[in-house]
Every structure is written in C-alpha cells, then in structure tokens.
Image (cartoon, rainbow, N blue to C red):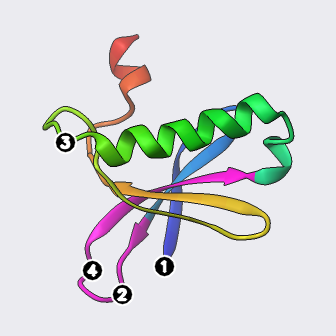
Amino acid sequence: MFGRQIGEGAYAVVRIATSRDNNQKYAIKVYDKTKLSDINRQRSVRREVVLLQKMNHPNIVKLIEAFETESHVYLVMENVSGGSLHSYLK
C-alpha cells in the first residue's frame, strides 16, 4: 500500500509503502513515463536500475525490485530514515 510522498525530483516521486506480507516499510521511486519521452532520460533510468542491482554497500540504498506498467516505472528500495541526501548535503 502506497503512503505519503517523501521525495520529489524532476522525473520521479518517492513514496513510502508498507508491505502487506510483513508490514515492512519501503521507499518506492515512481517514474512517470510521460516525463521520460527523451531517449537519454530512458537510458538513464535503465542505467540506474542496472547499477543499483549490482550495488552492495552499507552506504547505498538497496534496490529490492524494479518493475513497470504502461504508464510508470517503479523502483522498490529499502527505506532509510533521516531525510534526503540532498537535504543532508545542504
């Protein structure tokens, strides 16, 4: 079940989600495909998925699953509390 929005960028929003199976909280990055009409932006999203699938480091958010529908691309990631990296760096 999707919950409140916890982040936003130019091409995607991040929402909190809770698993029905185990009540685990996840961050879901949702790309609207209408905003991905540029081929370079589409490649960038694909590259993000491939790189996150390969990453295994305690300081990098883990990608749990990636899937898409006709209108959206979804990246299910571990939920990390404490705000965004952007806010922290500011």
Q: Kindly state the secondary structure of the residue where label 4 is placed.
A: loop
Label 3 vs 4, first from the N-terminus: 4
Question: On the picture, is 17 further left or further right than 80?
Answer: right
Q: Are marks 3 and 4 in contact (CB under 8 Å)?
A: no
Label 2 vs 3, first from the N-terminus: 2
Q: Kindly state the secondary structure of the residue where label 2 is placed.
A: loop
Query: Residue at horizontal 61%, vertical 47%?
Result: 13
Q: Are marks 1 and 2 in contact (CB under 8 Å)?
A: yes
Query: Which residue is identified by label 2?
Result: 20
Q: Kindly state the secondary structure of the residue where label 1 is placed.
A: loop
Task: Give the mark toward the camera: 2 or 3.
Answer: 3
Q: Quadrant of the C terminus?
A: top left
Instruction: For label 2, count other residues whose C-alpha is less than 10 Å away and answer few (under 14), some (14-19) or many (20+).
Output: few
**C-alpha separation, residue under disc 1 versus residue under disc 2:** 7 Å
Query: Which residue is identified by label 1?
Result: 1
Q: Position of residue 3 (x, y in %)?
A: 50, 67
Q: Which residues make up the magenta segment? A: 17-32
**C-alpha separation, residue under disc 3 versus residue under disc 4:** 24 Å
Query: Residue at horizontal 27%, vertical 46%?
Result: 80
In magenta stretch: residue 4: no
Q: As shown in the figure, which amino acid type bears the numbered disc 1?
A: Met
19 is higher (above) or lower (below) than 77: below
Label 1 vs 2, first from the N-terminus: 1
Question: On the picture, is 69 further left or further right than 46?
Answer: right
**Near-viewer residue (82 or 72):** 72
Instruction: For label 3, count other residues whose C-alpha is less than 10 Å away and answer few (under 14), some (14-19) or many (20+).
Output: few
Q: As shown in the figure, which amino acid type bears the numbered disc 3?
A: Asn
Farthest residue in the top direction?
A: 90
Query: Which residue is identified by label 3?
Result: 56
Query: Which residue is identified by label 4?
Result: 23
